[in-house]
Image (tube, helix red, strand yellow):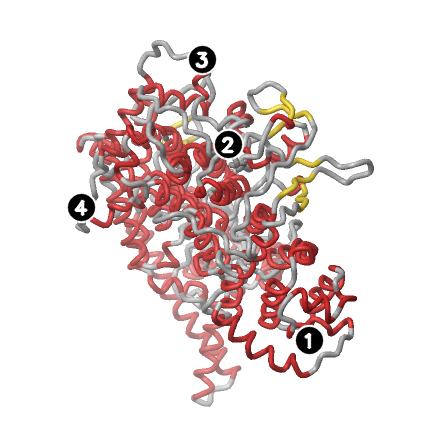
């Protein structure tokens, strides 16, 4: 605020010198007025809110950003709530953008301190939890103003529920639904200023269009991400209590909003039809005289809005019916969205674990506790768990199989490790050995069993479909294996599974829903239900509430998942071999990466069916290959520890893969079985070919004149030479046959140039080729295709260029080339004939 006050002091002086009350220019000059009363006396015709709004809209177009913020600070200080009420919706939209994504507002998602330090500093001070914008919110809150928020922009399940006249589970929406009057356009929520502001702030992450690929913004450095962190630290403090709202009037802090009472029948999930007239809003706390409980609703509202807007895009009911979100739920989260959710989860763990030891004891529940303490206990299980689980299930099943899944993975792993964000973590030693998970975290593991087990199976299924040779994919497997290999964690998960699978004694059917969302008639400030001491009952309630009563649970340490783990271990071993094979190829042929490679010019043998591995190792070099091998090696060791795999099992996997390859698999065929028509690839063989572990040595077996045009040949010239040679062969076929039939040197010379090796002499791999070989005998013919090669043409140009240096003209040079070739051909003819005589 010091920066804004300094600018206000510098800006106020010139404003005092010219006070012309023209309508378009009135606002900057009216800033010399120090109170709303003086404003009314000086300019009585300007008291209508429309003039203030019109002036601010004009300033938004004509004035620079810093000047606009200075003006807004003065307006918030000087004008009464009655006039500020008219500009508030426009101002919120001007900052966060429109709900349809057309207007981007201040574009907080791209605003970074290192790129735009001045604008960044002004925006952060203005939107700070203790800044001018929040002061405006509290100023309007004190007058109990309400603002309409269209239901059509709420998350899909919530919007569908309200449109069907069914009340959503979350008390956030209770007593707020406003139905349109005759001729109205749609449903709206009647929100108080704080709710309206937080709704827009949270939804701006979702409604704004994704950033262009050309714009590289680090999410953790942008203004929006920093503001989320500030709001969480302010309203969900890990130390002390929530700061009271800024006093905007002599009356002190703004009161809690009054309840609304719409009169339209709804039905709630799992409950009978009930009128909203019988309900109160979730933060109605007038029955509680505790000042802390009077203000705790802001913290509840912030968390409810963040969870609803960021996580509640897939319905639990549809997930339980189909085991995947419905096709109509087409919301696709972005990587930026996932990173912000991870920030929320990390702070919630720190917030929930900031209770003092005496506050977490079982006896603490029976004594009077502050609303903030109750809120800390309820934050994760009551608000987050259900929606986060369905959100993660959707991401695991629908996210692309690429490296961007790392954001989802880290969000999941952050939720699984609340001990990383507990206050006592600082007291632990920072050695290289993994820390043992304390037994105090066993209840959290058991009450979040599906987060550990079912999502782990989902990750296994993803990992089995990815290329583990990629360093980024190998890193993700390593990260998951490392987290689950923490000492004592696997034992906790296994104990939780035993508690769930043990026989059910006497547990009422309806109580399986105990840990679902709270009933709609209760407040989040109402006393937390009595602690259930039966650990088995807790685990069963957790699983049944998320998966339904008829779910089929697959144990993480059962035979089915163990089979998947062995398959993953097999793929890890294969990926290690592939990485080593690619590394050897990189060492042997480093020159293959040049743009004008010698093989492209034709000066070395060309492999038309050359192999190019389909992963990112070639681009990243030997260092990435080393990292891949290191990640996979450690991941394999962690999996062995988690599932107690023996060395003999891993050795058997290695043997089954055929690790004793000749030259790292270059001479060994892919895994095949022999069929009627030849070799048939097995699934393992297909994997070996796709990942470059092994390959067939393929060579062209057809007519050399009709083989595809190569990249080192000129297509048009090859076609012209083919037509010319075909015409010559057709015209002089008889003469060439007669010459090649002679037994003297001339016949041998013609056979050397006009015939090619018999097809039967080649090594035919295809059984079909063997049956057709007898019908493919060809007579003598002339082939001019070699003249269409870049190699030949470049060689000829080089010879002519060198000859010109010695003052030899093109014609003499051509004669010398012909004479030299004749001598070479005669020598080769003699050598060929002698070789045939030795074979006889």
**Pointer 2 with pointer 3, Cβ within 8 A:** no
Q: Which of the two discs, 4 and 2, labels the residue nearer the N terminus?
A: 4
Instruction: Give how far across and how far down residue 789 sits, in percent.
Output: 50, 65
Left or right, 345 with respect to 435, comes to: right
Mark 4 vs mark 2, foreground winner is 2
For the residue carrying disc 2, how many other residues have a C-alpha within 10 Å: few (<14), some (14-19), or many (20+)?
some
The disc at residue 433 is 4
Of residue 290 and residue 364, the one placed in the foreground of this image is 290
The disc at residue 29 is 1
Left or right, 725 with respect to 615, comes to: right
Q: Which of the two discs, 3 and 1, labels the residue nearer the N terminus?
A: 1
Task: Point out the residue furthest to the top here.
Answer: 506
Residue, x 48% and y 74% (percent of image)?
Answer: 796
Left or right, 493 with respect to 230, comes to: left
Looking at the image, residue 53 lies above or below residue 238: below
Instruction: Give how far across and how far down residue 798 sits, in percent.
Output: 45, 77
Task: Classify mark 1: helix, strand or loop.
Answer: helix
Instruction: Give how far across and how far down residue 280 sits, in percent.
Output: 58, 31
In space, the residues marked 4 and 3 are separated at their CA atoms by 45 Å
Task: Classify mark 3: helix, strand or loop.
Answer: helix
Q: Which residue is mark 3?
A: 509
């Amino acid at each position: 605020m010091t920066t804004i006050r300094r600018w206000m002091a510098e800006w106020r002086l010139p404003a005092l010198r010219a006070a012309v009350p023209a309508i378009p220019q009135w606002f900057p000059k009216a800033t010399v007025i120090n109170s709303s009363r003086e404003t009314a006396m000086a300019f009585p015709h300007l008291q209508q809110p429309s003039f203030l709004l019109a002036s601010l809209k004009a300033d938004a177009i004509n004035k620079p950003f810093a000047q606009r913020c200075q003006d807004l600070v003065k307006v918030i200080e000087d004008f009464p709530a009655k006039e500020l009420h008219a500009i508030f919706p426009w101002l919120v939209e001007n900052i966060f953008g429109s709900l349809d994504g057309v207007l981007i507002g201040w574009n907080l998602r791209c605003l970074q301190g290192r790129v735009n330090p001045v604008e960044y500093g002004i925006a952060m001070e203005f939107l700070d939890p203790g800044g001018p914008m929040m002061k405006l919110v509290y100023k309007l809150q004190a007058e109990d103003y309400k603002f309409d928020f269209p239901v059509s922009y709420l998350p899909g399940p919530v919007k569908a529920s309200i449109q069907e006249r069914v009340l959503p589970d979350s008390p956030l929406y209770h007593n707020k639904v406003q139905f349109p009057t005759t001729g109205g356009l749609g449903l709206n929520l009647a929100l108080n200023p704080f709710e309206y502001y937080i709704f827009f702030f949270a939804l701006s992450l979702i409604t704004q269009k994704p950033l262009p690929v050309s714009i590289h913004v680090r999410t953790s450095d942008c203004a929006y991400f920093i503001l989320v962190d500030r709001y969480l630290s302010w309203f969900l403090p890990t130390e002390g209590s929530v700061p009271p709202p800024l006093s905007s009037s002599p009356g002190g802090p703004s009161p809690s909003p009054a309840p609304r009472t719409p009169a339209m029948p709804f039905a709630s999930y799992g409950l009978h039809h009930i009128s909203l007239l019988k309900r109160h809003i979730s933060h109605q706390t007038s029955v509680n005289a505790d000042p802390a409980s009077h203000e705790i609703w802001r913290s509840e509202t912030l968390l409810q809005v963040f969870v609803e807007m960021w996580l509640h895009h897939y319905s639990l009911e549809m997930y339980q019916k189909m085991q995947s979100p419905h096709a109509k739920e087409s919301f696709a989260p972005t990587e930026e969205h996932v990173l912000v959710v991870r920030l929320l989860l990390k702070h919630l763990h720190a917030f929930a674990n900031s209770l003092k030891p005496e506050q977490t004891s079982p006896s603490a529940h029976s004594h009077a506790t502050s609303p903030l303490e109750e809120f800390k206990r309820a934050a994760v299980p009551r608000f987050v768990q259900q929606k986060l689980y369905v959100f993660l299930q959707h991401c695991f099943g629908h996210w692309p199989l690429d490296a961007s899944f790392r954001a989802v993975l880290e969000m999941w792993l952050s939720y699984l490790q609340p001990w990383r964000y507990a206050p006592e973590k600082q007291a632990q030693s920072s050695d290289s050995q993994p820390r043992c998970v304390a037994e105090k975290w066993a209840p959290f593991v058991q009450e979040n069993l599906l987060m550990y087990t079912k999502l782990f199976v989902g990750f296994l299924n993803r990992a089995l479909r990815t290329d583990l040779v990629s360093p980024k994919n190998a890193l993700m497997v390593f990260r998951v294996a490392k987290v689950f290999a923490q000492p004592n964690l696997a034992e906790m998960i296994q104990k939780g599974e035993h508690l769930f699978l043990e026989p059910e004694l006497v547990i009422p059917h309806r109580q399986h829903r105990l840990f679902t969302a709270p009933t709609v008639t209760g407040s989040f400030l109402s006393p937390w239900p009595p602690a259930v001491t039966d650990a088995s009952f807790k685990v069963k309630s957790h699983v049944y509430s998320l998966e339904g009563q008829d779910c089929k649970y697959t144990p993480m340490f059962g035979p089915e998942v163990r089979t998947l783990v062995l398959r993953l271990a097999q793929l890890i071993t294969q990926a290690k071999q592939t990485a080593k094979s690619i590394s050897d190829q990189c060492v042997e042929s480093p020159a293959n990466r040049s743009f004008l490679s010698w093989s492209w010019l034709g000066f070395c043998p060309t492999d038309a069916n050359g192999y190019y591995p389909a992963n990112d190792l070639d681009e990243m070099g030997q260092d990435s290959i080393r990292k891949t091998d290191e990640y996979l090696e450690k991941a394999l060791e962690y999996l062995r520890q988690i599932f107690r795999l023996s060395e003999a099992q891993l050795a058997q996997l290695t043997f089954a893969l055929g690790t004793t390859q000749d030259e790292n698999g270059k001479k060994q065929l892919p895994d095949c079985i022999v069929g009627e028509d030849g070799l048939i690839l097995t699934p393992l063989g297909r994997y070996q070919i796709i990942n470059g572990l092994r390959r067939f040595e393929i060579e062209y077996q057809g007519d050399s004149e009709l083989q595809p045009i190569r990249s080192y040949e000129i297509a048009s010239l090859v076609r012209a030479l083919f037509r010319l040679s075909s015409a010559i062969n057709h015209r002089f076929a008889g003469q060439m046959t007669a010459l090649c039939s002679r037994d003297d040197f001339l016949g041998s010379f013609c056979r050397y140039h006009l015939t090619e090796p018999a097809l039967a002499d080649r090594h035919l791999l295809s059984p079909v080729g063997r049956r057709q070989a007898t019908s493919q005998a060809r007579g003598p013919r002339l082939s001019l295709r070699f003249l269409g090669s870049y190699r030949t043409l470049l060689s000829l140009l080089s010879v002519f260029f060198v000859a010109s240096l010695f003052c030899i003209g093109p014609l003499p040079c051509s004669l010398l080339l012909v004479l030299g070739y004749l001598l070479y051909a005669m020598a080769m003819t003699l050598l060929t004939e002698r070789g045939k005589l030795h074979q006889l």
